Amino acid sequence: MASAETPSAAQPGPRLGLRERKKIQTRQAIRRAAYRLFEQQGYDATPVDRIAEAADVSPSTVFRYFPTKEDIVLTDEYDPALEAAIRARPAEEPPVEAIRQGVIVSMRDIVARDMTEFRQRARLMREVPALRRRAAEGMGESGHMLCGVLAERTGRAADDIELRIVVTAVFAAMNEALMYWDERGQTEDIVTLIERTLDVLGRGLTL
Amino acid sequence: MASAETPSAAQPGPRLGLRERKKIQTRQAIRRAAYRLFEQQGYDATPVDRIAEAADVSPSTVFRYFPTKEDIVLTDEYDPALEAAIRARPAEEPPVEAIRQGVIVSMRDIVARDMTEFRQRARLMREVPALRRRAAEGMGESGHMLCGVLAERTGRAADDIELRIVVTAVFAAMNEALMYWDERGQTEDIVTLIERTLDVLGRGLTL
DNA sequence: CCATCTTTTGAGAGTTACTATCATTCGACT
DNA sequence: AGTCGAATGATAGTAACTCTCAAAAGATGG
């Protein structure tokens, strides 16, 4: 509805056809409707049918765009940003340090782009068990990506155990930090918190 | 059926009433039936109704014993063993070392008790996404327990971030090691693998 | 041994997240 | 304008739960 975008104004690529633009719109409409309803009545109390209704599409369409209800909340575009940020670090830098800097850079970016959604997502991730689980499964896609990047850096195989341990531990720890951040009312500085988290890992989990 | 146990033979506690004994039996019947069917036809292809049928109880009963289908696989009694093993370590020992020894001891114990089930569980945990997620949410109960134990040892609060980071990282890493073990056909020595895992954590995730 | 009380069980109906199918519609391209 | 392929919507079906209530079975006191 609010598509007053001139065809030539599209920033990020070769101008999209109407079809593509509509897809993006629909996707956004579904997500926005969902986030709004989740805010109002909670995740579990909001059936997909009602989201569809609110987004003015059929339930089938919702499932075509998002394979599961969880994906409506969790689908993100953070990975490419993180990947780029890590790749930008000098090759000699030790892995954990590269991750640290990459995470911090991309985190600032994300928070700057849409802090409201970031906050809401964090809250949902902590409060809804299904989402927490899904997020805890860090190796999902993000982990795989990180393994690939670190494999190149270190010359190890992408499925090397030690590599996987590192990646898994980092993601799990960061996720936990996010939960902590949310528990405390999202008041602390998240970047500082993440730095602290990576410090603990970097010093071998000493207390 | 195979309950030729004399009332006075019960080892682990004050002799149970018939009611209690039946509950244990039922629980076991359900789990056994489930494991058998999962083995034969796979987890997703086995509806709870069929498990109920095989265990000779009603579907309602299955859900009374196990809140979710996942719980039939994942409910374990490892935590108490782990807790005891860690508590048995000298108080001066650094946390990660205490965890290492505790894990190794209780792991040997578990493997000795029922290696077959341990193997099958590991396989299911890797192959079924729902189970993998559930397991990845290590903080669930095990993590909470470990936090408590380490809090006592270190004098920190049980919800101290750094403490939680440590626990989360350890569990996530061990879980990943288990997945690796299963991927390789469960052929390597699991204790060695876990030691290696904890080494990586202990040396600050250096590669 | 019977009566009663409590706990466990089973049966039924209902909700919801998904899956599959198929006809319709709508943008793309000639 | 007309055709083609992709997106949509309607419909039906499966399976994991949840709730409720009545029947069955173990515990308990006389």
Image (tube, coloured by chain):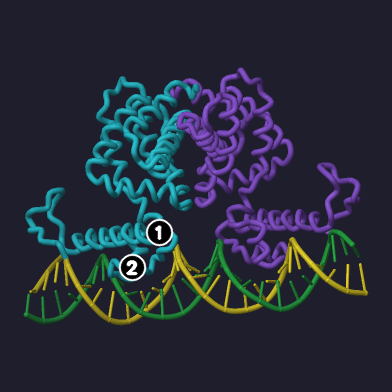
Chain colours: A purple, B cyan, C green, D yellow
Quarter in which the N terminus of chain B is drawn:
bottom left
* Residue A53 image point, x, y percent: 69, 66
Examine the rendering and report whether any part of residue A128 can be seen. yes
Q: Which residue is mark 2?
A: B52
Q: Nearer the viewer, mark 2 or mark 1?
A: 1
Label 1 resides on the chain identified as B
* Residue A90 image point, x, y percent: 66, 20
Q: Residue furthest top?
A: A92
Q: Residues within 10 Å of mark 1 (few under 14, many from 20)?
A: some
Q: Residues within 10 Å of mark 2 (few under 14, many from 20)?
A: many
Name which residue lies at 57% across and 40% down.
Answer: A182
Dot 1: what SS?
loop
Task: Tell me which corner region of the image, top left, top right, bottom left or bottom right, holds residue B4.
Answer: bottom left
Dot 2: what SS?
helix
Return the disc, 2 or 1, that comes first in the chain's sequence: 1
- Residue type highlighted by circle 1: Gly
Q: Is residue D1 left or right of residue C12?
A: right
Name which residue lies at 84% across and 57% down.
Answer: A18
* Residue A21 image point, x, y percent: 81, 54
Q: Which residue is mark 1?
A: B42
Label 2 resides on the chain identified as B
* Residue A128 image point, x, y percent: 53, 51
- Location of residue A72 with respect to B97 vertically, above or below: below
Name which residue lies at 38% across and 61% down.
Answer: B41
